[in-house]
Each structure stands twice: as structure tokens, then as C-alpha cells.
Amino acid sequence: MKNLKDRVEAILFSANRPLSLNNLIDLFEVEDEEKKSKIISALFQVKKDYEGKAVELIEVASGYRFQIKQDFSEDVAKLWEVKPLKLSRATLETISIIAYMQPVTRGDIEEIRGVSVATSVVKLLIDQGWAKIKGYRDIPGRPALFITTQKFLDDFSLKSLSELPELPNLPDVLSIDPELSLQNDVDAERSKNI
């Protein structure tokens, strides 16, 4: 009988998508708790075997997958002629707002960014599979509510949204005293002219 750790490793290498623990349990047709714990143990053994190597076993939102460590990404990228997706600042800002504030409408995004959101930006995020429409806000016009997807988490190597970097603490805009007060400048100019 083949070693369970080797079988888990072979399946994960062969998979074209992340595999969850439940996927592995189903593939091995395991039903009792003792065998389930052996699969978990095998996963951790495989992960440990790859520590310090160019390939690592990571857990993302959809499950476990092998990937090349970030240190080697530039070298590996040379294998493919297709250029990596270049994201505009507007696209990055839009997906960031969706990720941190979801569910949000296009109007919410525009209010936060201070500029309108191009239809092409939203279409790109949906086509990439990073955002989707969750429903519609119950207000006039029924705007779509956007959320991030499992693919967004997988593509950015996240298990959950809680792994997103923390937003910096920004001061409350209303508490900031302007260096120059427009009204004081107008009053000073009037007094000069009198």
C-alpha cells in the first residue's frame, strides 16, 4: 500500500485547483475520524517537507495548493509569453474598496474614490472572477451590491478577508484644522480695501 503522505502529495501536485480537506477526504473515500486525522497529519507532513524549498504547500480560501515561492516568481514568469495582468490604479482602488467595505454599490465606490467608476473597471473585476454581484440594494434604482469571490482570495493567496492588511488609522477629516481659512483670508482682504 502506498504511503498516505505520498498519495496526498501526488494528488495536490496533479490538481488544477486548490483542494479542501473535504475534497481529500472524498477522494480517499474516508469515513471514520481516525483516517481523517491521518489525512490532516499527511498534509502537515507534506507542508513540512517543502519548507525551505522553492515550492511550498499553502492553504488558501478554497483549500491547499502547491505554488512557487514569491522569491522565484520573476524567473518562472519568463516561461510564459503572456504578460501578467497589469492593473490600473482605478482597478486596484476599486477592488480594494470592494474587499474592505463589501457589500458595496458602484455609488459607494464612487463616493469613497471621489471619481466615477468606469464600466470597464467593474467588467474587468467580474471577468477576472474577483468580484460578483451579491444582490441589489433596496433603494430607488436598485443598484447592484458587489462582493469579492473565492477566486479573489485564491489569486491573492488569502484564506479569508481577515488576512487583508489593516488599513492605516487616518485622522477624521472634520477634526483637521485647515492651515489657511478661506473666510479669514476674505475678511483680511476686505479690511485692507476699506
Image (tube, rainbow, N blue to C red):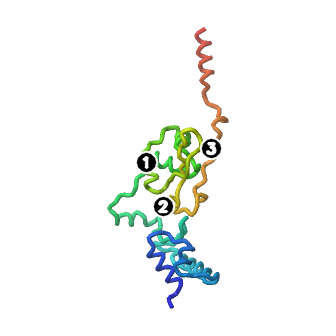
Residue 156 % position (x, y): 50, 60
With respect to residue 161, does 68 lie above or below?
below
**Label 1: element kind:** loop
Pick the residue in front: 143 or 72.
143
Residue at position x 58%, y 61% from top? 160
Q: Residue furthest bottom?
A: 1
**Label 2: element kind:** helix
> Which dot marks residue 88?
1
**Residue identified by numbered label 3:** 170
Badge 1 amino acid: Ser
Nearer the N terminus, badge 1 or badge 3? 1
With respect to residue 181, does 94 lie above or below?
below
The answer to which image quadrant residue 165 occupies is bottom right
Graded by Cα atoms within 10 Å as few (under 14), some (14 to 19) or many (20 or more), the crowding at tag 1 reads: few
Badge 2 amino acid: Asp
> Which dot marks residue 155?
2
Q: Quadrant of the C terminus?
A: top right
Residue 23 % position (x, y): 53, 74
Residue 114 % position (x, y): 52, 38
| Separation (CA) of disc 1 from disc 3 | 24 Å
Q: In the rendered view, does 102 fall on the left or right side of 72?
A: right
Nearer the N terminus, badge 2 or badge 3? 2
Residue at position x 53%, y 83% from top? 5
Decide: marks 1, 3 in contact (CB < 8 A)? Answer: no
